[in-house]
Amino acid sequence: MLMPRTLLARTFLLLAMLVLLTTAAWLSLFRYIDAEPRARETAQLAASAVNLIRASLFAAAPDKRLGLFTEFSTREGIRLLPAEPEDRIEALPDSRFIRLLQRELNARLGEHTRIAASVDEVSGFWVSFRLDDADDEEYWLVLPRERAARDFASPWLLWGLLAVALALAVAWIIASRISRPLKAMAKSAETVGRGQKPAPLPEDGAEELSRLAVAFNTMAADLERHEKDRSEVLAGISHDLRTPLTRLRLEAEMSVADSARQAVVSDIEQMEAVISQFMDYARTESGEAPVATDLSALLAGIADRQRYVGHPLTTAIDDLPETLLRPKAITRAVTNLIDNAVKYGGGEITLAAATVNGEIQVDISDRGSGVPPDEIERLKRPFTRLENARTNATGTGLGLAIVERIARLHEGRLDLLPNPGGGLLVRLVLPIRR
């Protein structure tokens, strides 16, 4: 069975099934209970008509009975026909109501009583009777066919349909009141996952949902506070380390021998690069507001700066639509990806950008050794590098983690793909928001 995907649709479907099954059971029970009194009423009507005809025929002379038949038909509207052996008889459909009706007629008119849906292709409610149990002569009494039909009265059907419609409307209200807070909570959880602060959830409604909203709001506030504390500590430590590092650089320039000076300065520069990555990681989710940005121009500026510092870079940037994003964060992300390509990939490095399926794709590709497929997700975590890059790497393993967080901050994603020409293709996918 194919179930709907949303909680609202599933809850409404289950409640609707319950309502419909209950209504069907109620109607079936009504039909069952109603069958016996209806059969008794119909049998009583037919028996009364037969008894009236019997009394009239007994009072009439035998040679006057044919005229009496005509009199019943023309004056009283009662069709009365003699039964013939060659009559073509169509039985009524077998049902509990027909069986009860037959039993009641047999009890009132005798075991020889027959009922039929049509005789000689004339439809109606046909009831046979004899003037006397010892008499072989048999007659047909024709009543309207509706007397043998068990149709519900239209008011009952109308009220039943109204009750079903009202129950389904209430079921929809119940299902929506359950699913609406959960949908809002799921949206807020996605916002928290992107590193943003969600709007507080309303804490009213049912007790269980209210307690859940209170717990979620408390959790979101705690996460925001812990993230701010972590970022401040990390940024503070990184900032405080720069002062002694600057002093060490100055002392190395003034007092260290020329043979060791370059090594000391190189170590200090590596430490400063590590500190810069820590600060980038700490301020990834800073309060920079998204603004309408010409991404094509932003990427072109990044490419120019990379060429200026000596990085070989080929660009293929299309005319991209203006979109809402955080320019500093995107600059940091693309710069990190190009630095990684230069450091670990080598060869020809390409920066490409295009609009594909309503999204912006920024691709940085290199001609290095690539990344094993089973290592892709692990490399997006902080402080993680490939095994073959550990011995000669000078970074901290935060580059891809920074880019991943920036992508999530923009409701996008980071993909690591094999480069068709060999190497690695890193794709930053950003939604177009105007």
Image (cartoon, rainbow, N blue to C red):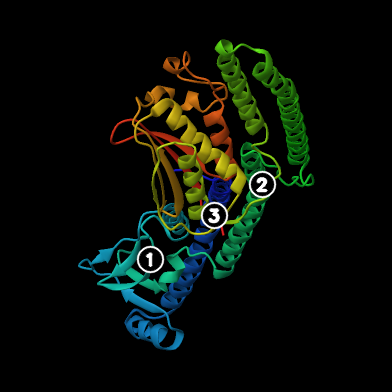
Looking at the rendered structure, the kind of residue marked 2 is Ala
* Residue sitting at x 57%, y 63%: 161
| 309 and 8: which is toward the camera | 309
CA gap, disc 3 to disc 1? 35 Å
Q: Which residue is mark 1?
A: 129
Q: What distance separates the C-alpha of mark 2 from that of mark 1?
A: 74 Å
Task: Name which residue lies at 47% across and 45% down.
Answer: 303
Note whether 71 is above or below 314 in the view shown.
below
Q: Along the polypeptide, which appears first: circle 3 or circle 1?
A: 3
Q: Is residue 396 left or right of residue 74?
A: right
Residue at x 48% of width, y 65% of height = 151
Quarter of the rendering occupied by the N terminus = top left
Q: Amino acid at mark 3?
A: Leu
Q: Which mark is residue 184?
A: 2
| Front label number (3 vs 1) | 3
Give the crowd class for mark 1: few <14, some 14-19, many >=20 residues within 10 Å. many
Q: Quadrant of the C terminus?
A: bottom right
Q: Which residue is mark 3?
A: 27
Q: Nearer the viewer, mark 2 or mark 3?
A: 2
Please tell me in which quadrant of the rendered image residue 153 appears.
Answer: bottom right
**Which residue, as the protein is rendered here, is positioned at the far left?**
86
The answer to the question of whether label 3 and label 1 lie on touching residues, with beta carbons closer than 8 A, is: no
Residue 416 is marked as none
Is label 2 or label 1 in front? Answer: 2
Q: In front: 400, or 194?
A: 400
